[in-house]
Image (cartoon, rainbow, N blue to C red):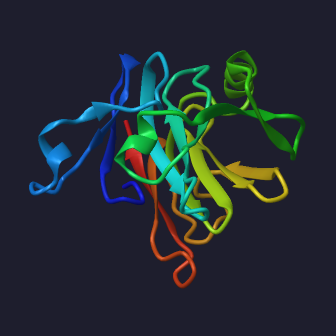
Amino acid sequence: LSPWNTWISCEEHDRGQCWQVDPEPSIPNHNSPMVTLLGGDGGNYESVAVDNTNENKPIFFTTEDNSSGELRRFEADGNDWDALHVGGRTTYLEFLDGSTFQWTTSMWAGQRSAANYYPNSEGIAYHNSTLYFVSKATRRLYILNLTDKTYTSERTGSSWVGQGSFNSQPDQIIGNDMDKRQYIYFTEDG
């Protein structure tokens, strides 16, 4: 869900895109879904999360279910329907060592990082300057502190609040009033 209450739907196939859809029938864009800039030239996109801390420049994060599918960060130039279609800047997640990361303009560096650390990324959620996402190939939850650019990871279901267990691969994660309940829910793929 975007900050302006539209949906972002990801296509999970080789040349897939991320589409913006307005669910409100009374809005002019309702019958005109549009490809966003989130997916660039296309990919196997899975999920989108948004950091709307700066309401004039929301930041969107997109995962790609591919063995070298880079995690994308798109900084929008506005805060309405057009923000996902005009302007903005895309960078890619690059892990630097065992605990730090950066956002780079090099897609290749993002792809290399994905292949080495977080292949086949799936669900993603943002909450209070923290980004959470899962890799189904490694069965890991990654927790990125966006303020100090550090990260941790752990095997899904092993030690985080809720301690779920999975016989298959983690898929989607959803924040559920995390300030009070402190849960992230996983669903299984497979």
Q: Outermost residue, right direction? A: 97
Q: Outermost residue, bottom direction? A: 180
Q: Nearer the viewer, residue 186 or 121?
A: 121
Question: Residue 38 at what x, y percent from top left?
Answer: 48, 33
Question: Residue 147 at what x, y percent from top left?
Answer: 79, 59
| Figure quadrant of the C terminus | top left
Lateral position of residue 185 relative to residue 6, left or right: right
Residue at 48% of width from left, 28% of height from top?
A: 65
Q: Is residue 161 above or below residue 15?
A: below
Lateral position of residue 116 relative to residue 74, left or right: right
Q: Is residue 69 above or below residue 22?
A: above
Q: Nearer the viewer, residue 59 or 48?
A: 59
Question: Residue 47 at what x, y percent from top left?
Answer: 44, 42
Residue at 88% of width from left, 41% of height from top?
A: 98
Q: Is residue 148 above or below residue 46?
A: below
Question: Residue 152 at what x, y percent from top left?
Answer: 78, 52
| Figure quadrant of the N terminus | bottom left
Residue 131 placement: quadrant:
bottom right
Residue at 58% of width from left, 57% of height from top?
A: 157
Is there any visible trace of residue 93 in the rendered image?
A: yes
Residue at 49% of width from left, 22% of height from top?
A: 40
